Amino acid sequence: MPFAAFEHESWLAFFKALRGSFKIPSTEAIGCDLMRSEYALTMNDVLLALAKNTRICFTLDGATNVQGKQIINMMACRPQPFFLKHFTIELRRESAANLLEKFLNCKLRLLGSIRKPAPGFVLTTDEEDVKNPMNDTDVEVEREEGRPCKTNEHFINPPMFCFCSDSPSVMVKLRKDCLNTKEFVFAYGCAPHAIHNLCMDLIKNFPGVKIVLKQIIYTGTVFFAAQRVRKVKAACATLPGEILNADLDIDISDDLKMLLTDPAYWRGVAAMDSLFKTISCCLTYLEGDEATFSAVYACFFAIKYHIKTLDLSVMEALHLNDDDICEMIRLIHHRFSTIYSEAHALVFCTDPLFTSMHRLMGFRFDEKFLHLGKGSINQQSKTAIALISMGNEILRRSMLSEFAVLVTRQQDTEDDFSDTSIKPSVLWTVCDESSYGSLSGPLSALHQNPTGASGGERNHKATRRVHTKNRARMGHSKIESGTAILFNSGQLVRRLTPTRNTKFCTWLQQLGADDEGLPVEEEALDEEEDAAADALIEEFDHVHISDGLEGVMGNELFDEEVMDEGSIFYN
């Protein structure tokens, strides 16, 4: 234990000098009693926060190798994620049925902690664990008479449960099984993972795209790699001439020399930059906690529009034709289908930020262009409304009538949805209940769903800090408690902004309205320096490398960054 260091006589003398009456707790007290107490306080605050919600979305973020073990993080989002539990399993051997049993058991325990049983029902525990529903507190639960709580209907006012995960085969099967249990209203995949896989598809399936990069880069950083290559264009152009003219025993391979002096290669770098700019920016936005659930459909559509309207010069540089563009659009539809839920279409239609995009694109192309391979958006929304109503025919009809009023409203009308800079969950919370009484509650909750399981990815940072070599023998429960304390204590004090006044959201809202490009915060390359680099490519034998570097790097330090996948970039 790292706390054992403080039991050294020098540390004890130091603490005694600070405060004579102070006695440092023993390592057993810190690692057991104090950790258990702090865990109970933290998780109690988490349960209070989750109890206020009418919707809870669970996420499972996949496996991560930590101390030789594969761990799945179970999170509950409101919308910021809270860590609940670790699953230590082997995904290649674990079946979806076994994972479903563990998942439903944890969900039932959480529901029993935030809701009271309905009359005639009681909370029960299995024989293996007769403890507190959330952790090892050694507090036994008294058994009562009554039917055991097994489903959502056995509790008073249960929240609407949704489920999100990444998309390996076992998780896809798990999402289907969750919907079949009727315990979850919606189950969908992780949007950032899907866009990352789309980047992999583009590099893998189109030889012309490989003109710049031959390795698959995590989460679409191909765009940033192209940016870095363009920044050192002048330096790379002078490199062959410097090596050939210098009195050094250094040879440059013919392949590298041909590559660095090939104008087609540098046109490919610029084309790669243009191709992946929109895709990477959409991915970056969806990975953040501030991204709205409705932006998933909008971002996939923005990528489709970007590919559909790709500039001819980019197509020529990457050796793409019209058939390749159609194949790219098919891949977009395929990747969207791997995460699809009817809820994606419903929240897109009910977010006023995207009303202008919806109508403009329907007018510019046709309504079918908006479908992303899943049929009419309105029909998808009607299906989602039917799922939310849970068989209540009166509620379904009321929600459908209110939905019809919403989609036919005049866009320039001053009403509850005029201020599109406010997030839709807030707009639906404060809207006029006399007009949208049936839709306001479910949609204000549904719009708070996360775009993916990225919260679990960020939790890995907390997990790595807890899973150190010195703590490898702490035991699973202590590591789980430490992760919950470290991650959830920070999440409890976080407050997400109620607005979305970003350049990206503005661009997304006005997509197709003008010819302006995507607003990206980046340092534009100087056209004169770029032209000078092109000249060096044609006449590189008499140029000194210091001349090529001047003006490109300036006073900036180009630090070497080694990515996890083994590719080296410079920024």
Image (tube, grey):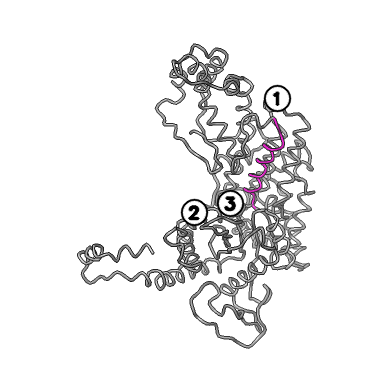
Residue 570: give x, y in percent of width and height: 49, 33
Kindly state the secondary structure of the residue where label 3 is placed. loop
Q: Is residue 162 above or below residue 201?
A: below
Q: Nearer the viewer, residue 405 or 199?
A: 199
Task: Check disc 2 and report the residue beneath it.
Answer: 461
Tell me the SS state at disc 2: helix
- Judged left or right of residue 18, residue 115 is right
In this orientation, which residue lies closer to the viewer: 240 or 224?
Answer: 240
Query: Is residue 487 rendered to the left or right of residue 417?
Result: left
Can you identify the residue that label 3 sits on? Answer: 423
Q: Which residue type carries mark 3?
A: Lys
Nearer mark to the viewer, of 1 and 3: 1
Q: Residues within 10 Å of mark 2 (few under 14, many from 20)?
A: few
Rounded to the nearest angstrom, the CA distance separating label 1 from label 3 is 40 Å
What residue is rendered at 60% in x and 28% in y? 269
The span picked out in magenta is 190-207
Q: Where is residue 142, by image quadrant? A: bottom right
Which mark sits nearer the N-terminus, 2 or 3? 3
Kindly report which numbered mark, 2 or 3, lies closer to the viewer in this rendering: 2
Q: Amino acid at mark 1?
A: Glu
| Left or right of residue 453, residue 250 in this image | left
Amino acid type, mark 2 = Lys
Asked if the stretch drawn in magenta spans residue 199, the answer is: yes
